[in-house]
Image: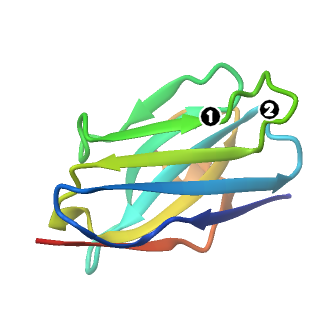
Amino acid sequence: QVQLIESGGGLVQAGDSLRLSCVASGRTISTYTLGWFRRPPGKEREFVAAITWSGGNTMYGNSVPGRFTISRDDASRADAKNTVYLQMNSPKPEDTAVYYCAAAKEYLGIRPAAYDYWGQGTQVTVSS
């Protein structure tokens, strides 16, 4: 079992920046991918970005080209926290959504069904 807790959401003005965090606990996550999805109001859930905990390989969705960056704590450090971040630069009103953190074992991709564990979500609202 992997527990995921997101934080960092809130109200932000277009053009500012915001960083979301997701802390993973429970099982060791060395073989997991941690990803971010979002559900805009009235729309389907969509993939944002994902990163493998071991190796730090990343993948991004088409909806946020170049504006968002996913990263994780340095897994080689003894004091590393199991935390993944989503840096949102120059957000736009269309980035308004509930953002979810998710974990998938040995999978780096965009399919929500492949992610076994989900956080409760954090609301991000971007004002114009």
How many neighbours does mark 1 have within 10 angstroms: few (below 14), some (14-19), or many (20 or more)?
some
The circle drawn on residue 50 is none
Which residue is rendered at x = 17% and y = 55% of the image? 15
The furthest residue to the left? 128
Identify the image quadrant of the C terminus. bottom left
Q: Identify the amino acid type marked 2.
A: Ser
**Residues at marks 1 and 2, CA–CA distance in whole angstroms:** 12 Å
Residue marked by disc 1: 107
Of 111 and 120, the residue lying toward us: 120
Image location (x, y in percent) of residue 25: 82, 55
Of 33 and 123, the residue lying toward us: 123
The furthest residue to the bottom? 42
Which residue is rendered at x = 21% and y = 50% of the image? 90
The circle drawn on residue 30 is 2
Of 74 and 66, the residue lying toward us: 74
Secondary structure under tag 2 reads loop
Image location (x, y in percent) of residue 32: 72, 37
Identify the image quadrant of the N terminus. bottom right
Q: Identify the amino acid type marked 1.
A: Tyr
